[in-house]
Amino acid sequence: MNIIVTTHDSIHPIKGGGALRTLKTAEEFRRRGHNVIIIAPTDGAAEVNGIKIEWLRGPSKQRSQILSSIKFNVRLLIKYLKFIRWADLIFVHNTIAAAVMLFLKPVFRCRFALDITDIHAEYLSIGRRTIMETLATPLLLFIEYRIIRIAESITAASLAMKRVLVEHGVRPDRIEVVYDGAEIDRLSAEKSDDFYFNLIHLGLIDKQHGVDVLIKALPEVLKEFPLVKCFIVGDGRELTKIKSLALELGVFDNCVFTGQLPCQEARAYLQKANIGIIPRRDNLPNRIVTTLKLLEYWASGTGVISSRLEAITEVGMEGLNITYFEPGSPSALALQIKRLLSAPEKLDLLRANGIKAAHHYCWDLLAPQIADKAVEL
């Protein structure tokens, strides 16, 4: 088969779990003997891991999500028109890169496989919205679920996500649940000498990630454990606000803000951390995702404290490889951090079991499942 693989995330350098998932699937298609072209944001590379790349500029992570997504899809449409008559299958990761399929599929009768790890329009209901976002949200939700319904095959990142899709009219027989994976061979469980009192939040810092909950928990933690340091590794629309909050609460000196880093440089901070935090609040888009950071925490031997959210509870077992706290509660998060730091044996057990759990979510197991569903006739 001739297969176009598309995502809105940067493939080279890898930025985000979606890009990694997409690249692993493209490599699996090629391993099976298919002809593959990737259309995705890169740094201008002509190929990645031997697969031809058609480069285009990605949507902005700093400005309006709606406007940047529209511009991205216009650029994407131009690229698609160049290759669509060649393609037997178009495989798209997430709907931001699939909006053009509403127009292309009826005209070219192309087969369309969709891989979903987020329902992006659902995030618009979180926090403050511009007037345009408020007015556009119902329409964007309608469009996003419409895009999903026209796909012949769908892989979703959790059972919770599958239930939401079925509630919105997606045929359940079209959906296969395939969880996210970790590059276990590129993550080390070795720790630095001074790792014990270090916390980490790894990944994007947007409103849905709840990093403010972590920052608000730090004053209470520092009263009992003044040596605690918190690595905030990543960039995003909320980073400036998070820095201001840390200054306001007097915890800025106990935080390290790295900004955006290449994937392997960001992962290196996991070797300096004892506890990884997932502080997302309890709302629909957060309830249906597992997040890549959970798996990278596990694979790096980092203990995990997470908001108790539906999809994460599908894979994380309380007291065995994860500790939960009440979503949105800084005091509940602070309490769990202090409990783990006061119980080295329990923390060591979480870390050891996390390493074991990560091996169930490696790409050698998961990428073939995504590819199987995509080429299913």
Image: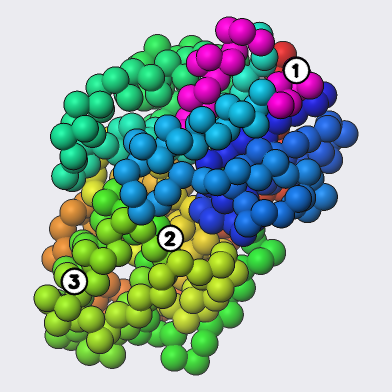
Q: Split into 4 quadrants, where in the image is the N terminus?
A: top right
Amino acid found under the numbered disc labelled 3: Ser
Mark 3 or 1: the one toward you: 1
- Which one is earlier in the sequence, the residue at label 3 or at label 1? 1
Circle count = 3
The circle on residue 85 is 1
Residue positioned 46% across, 44% down in the render: 59
Amino acid found under the numbered disc labelled 1: Arg
Residue range (magenta): 82-108
**Would you name the residue on which mark 2 appears?**
203
Local SS, label 2: loop
Q: Is residue 260 above or below residue 210?
A: below
Q: Is residue 188 visible?
A: yes
From the top left corner, tell me how far across and down residue 98 is, in percent. Answer: 52, 27
Quarter-of-image position of residue 304: bottom left
Viewer-side residue, 19 vs 31: 19
Viewer-side residue, 166 vs 58: 58
Instruction: Give the Cα distance between marks 3 and 2.
Output: 19 Å
